[in-house]
Image (cartoon, coloured by chain):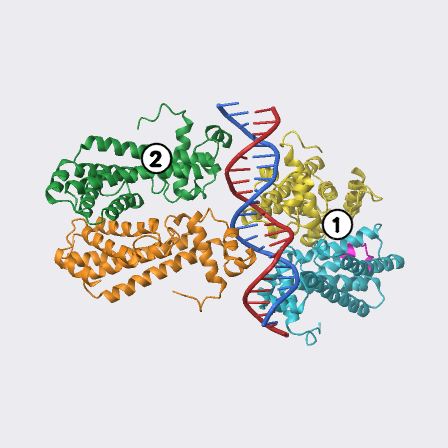
Chain colours: A cyan, B yellow, C green, D orange, E blue, F red
DNA sequence: TATGAATGAGAATTCATTCAT
DNA sequence: TATGAATGAATTCTCATTCAT
């Protein structure tokens, strides 16, 4: 997250403000005046940073995807070749991401209607890459025989859905830390994929 | 599903139109003009039926919850006492519900910010009842030893999340029917809960 | 006030409701729905009694003027020829009228802008008659030497203004009865007109 | 009375336009479109200056009260201690005020129903101060024996009412100047208060 | 008489955005 | 860069009134 330093100061404050407002009221429910106010700047200044509301949304979504996919790739790199460890890496990265960004303010799930056509296809392309990361790991695990789920597609969807849902209830003041939650979800995900006990034990010990 | 007969004609057409528009563009992204237009009536007529946009949203959400919880209760009644069959009943009802109502137009997930305080607490109360239905079944299964998940709370959340996610990709023209999808998700849910093989076989045969 | 019996039941309830609403919120601030509701009838019924909002206003104003001018004429008749007694009659009638009708709901002072041209001239004509009643009495008093004000026109306006103002503060639960107030205002009015002490004593004793 | 210099240009034009429209049609009878049009600006610009219709009304009323009470205080200061001269000061200030501001557009008599609770109490508080100014003078005059009215409270109301009524008929093109009218009303007011002839003569000569 | 549905114009207000400086 | 004024379209909602039955 070494993004700071490069960005022209106001940029990040603006993105942060927009992220929060969008998260609280949704894209359409938020006025750029509210964003400017929360960012502590005038409307005119806001327009100097971004040409419009849409671009603000897109910047947020893109930034979130950068952060998420970057984390995923880094985690995969570190995980090596073992499908179980790779799966654990993805789950952990997803949980951390959902915990870090408020509820729906991140990938702005459900705000796709606010995207214009160009950005929508860009977004879908990147989202597909994300899906692919999971699919690849699941397929690798099936190929090597450590995963045995009869419904790989649905199992992959289930894993992603349950990880994403963490963003809806996670509270930093809760009893469990993010990483403790991540551990549990790794276990649950392996269960969903019907991971062989031996491989599972190895992975859970490792992380 | 022609619920007509009770409702004064335009009411249902209006709800249907609003459901579709809200699903496509979100609550704030939808203008009541668009709703009226889709329902084929003038703005004034819309206001003749409903006192405002909020009430329209609330009516939709309430109706959806009525349908969902009604289906759940009926399914539970029919399932008898066996926790496995009860779990299967809830999963099936949820999948069917998510398939029947377009994406986010049903329980209007993520539009809570548009609820006023009164309705929000009403909504949360009902939602808690839904959560409870799942919790009760999970607990009963754990008590009787057929479920063995070490994380009942998270497993329950995972099951609900994966069922809800069906609404995001389900396409009636797809290869699998709703009930086939439901069968798969019952299997996945039982896997998540670490259901004993014997009980599982029994349940999957039964449905 | 034997007006009842003739009017078709709903009529008077309607006028009463309209009078109250207009008094509370002004003509433009009142919707005919509010009037219908206060009168306990449906919109359609209201429109059966009166063709529109304007006519309702005009009916109220006319009825109020009927009541007021009727009372004035009766009082003048009873007063005989003495200017002092005639003045006392007018003042008393005016005070009683202002006390009987809520604040501005009576002659709807200040709602002339809501009158159409035809009614406006009709209203002005009647109002002029009212003014004339006072003027005549003042002039008679001057002619006979009992009134000695050097500014008859302004004195007349002052008397009328102070009587009308009673409607703005009169409270039936107050310490003084309407007639006690009227007595005081007769005294004040005679003072304004610089009535000769002898004539004054006679008049104040008489009433 | 060119108050300009402080206010940002459009503000005063707006207030003037609103004052005139409100005076002609009443608060509820006036649309902000009409105000904007009379002020020669667009709706949006109007909203740039004032956040809403209510605030416009309140600004007008407050400004009018500032002007009136300011004039009263200045006049009282100049009048010295003599109750007769003080009374004359108040009457003159009131007449001038009523003549300067169109009919009911000033203290917006009779538009209290359009005030919100907060402003209503603020308004009533200031209005009470105005009442008090008159009461104090009347009481002082009674104490010193120059006023002899047996009904001080009603006399005070009468004086205020007759002065206020000037705004309903005053026409700058009339035969009498504002100050000539004021002189007459001072005389009438002193008559109402039953001022001692000696003191009266002195006061009428002085002004 | 009576009714509830329907109508279309107009209400106040907010929006994202641009412009002149 | 930065600013506050300006813009005009769109927003939700209310209005007085009429219509079909």
Seen in the image, is A68 located left or right of residue B52? right
Residue on which disc 1 sits: B168
Q: Chain of mark 2?
A: C
Q: Main secondary structure of the magenta part?
A: helix
From what the image shows, is residue B204 above or below residue D46?
A: above
Quarter assignment of residue D43: bottom right
Q: What percent of the width, then of the height, locates residue C62?
A: 37, 34
- Which disc number belongs to residue D74? none
Q: Farthest residue to the left: give it.
A: C198
Q: What is the quadrant of residue A171 in the picture?
A: bottom right
Q: Is residue B144 left or right of residue D117?
A: right
Q: Which residues are magenta?
A: A189-198
Residue D205 visible in this rendered orientation of the protein: yes
Pick out the residue farthest to the front: D175
Tag 2 residue: C64
Q: Is residue B95 magenta?
A: no
Whole-percent x and y of residue D138?
Answer: 20, 56
Give the letter of the chain under mark 1.
B
Asked if both marks, 2 and 1, belong to the same chain, the answer given is no
Q: Quadrant of residue A20?
A: bottom right
Report the mark closest to the observer, 2 or 1.
2
Label 2: state its secondary structure: helix
Q: Is residue A191 magenta?
A: yes
Secondary structure of the residue carrying numbered label 1:
helix
Of residues D198 and C94, which is closer to you in this image?
Answer: D198
| Residue C131 horizontal side relative to residue D199, left or right | right
Q: Residue at x 54, y 58 (%)?
A: D41
Distance Cα–Cα, label 2 vs label 1: 68 Å
A99 relative position to C48: left or right: right
Residue B195 in sight: no
């Amino acid at each position: 997250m070494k993004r700071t330093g490069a960005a022209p100061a106001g940029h990040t404050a603006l993105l942060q403000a927009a992220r929060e407002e969008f998260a609280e009221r949704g894209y359409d429910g938020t006025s750029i005046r509210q964003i400017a106010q929360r960012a502590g700047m005038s409307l005119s200044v806001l327009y100097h940073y971004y040409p419009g509301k849409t671009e603000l949304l897109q910047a947020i979504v893109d930034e979130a995807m950068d952060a998420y996919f970057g984390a995923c790739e880094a985690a995969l790199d570190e995980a090596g070749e073992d499908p179980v460890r790779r799966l654990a890496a993805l789950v952990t990265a997803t949980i951390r991401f959902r915990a870090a960004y408020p509820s729906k303010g991140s990938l702005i799930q459900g705000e796709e209607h606010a995207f214009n056509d160009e950005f929508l296809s860009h977004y879908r392309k990147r989202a597909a890459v994300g899906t692919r990361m999971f699919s690849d790991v699941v397929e690798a695990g099936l190929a090597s025989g450590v995963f045995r789920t009869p419904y790989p597609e649905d199992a992959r969807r289930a894993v992603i859905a349950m990880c994403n849902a963490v963003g809806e209830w996670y509270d930093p003041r809760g009893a469990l830390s993010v990483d403790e939650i991540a551990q549990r979800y790794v276990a649950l995900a392996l269960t969903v994929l019907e991971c062989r006990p031996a491989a599972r034990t190895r992975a859970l010990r490792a992380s």
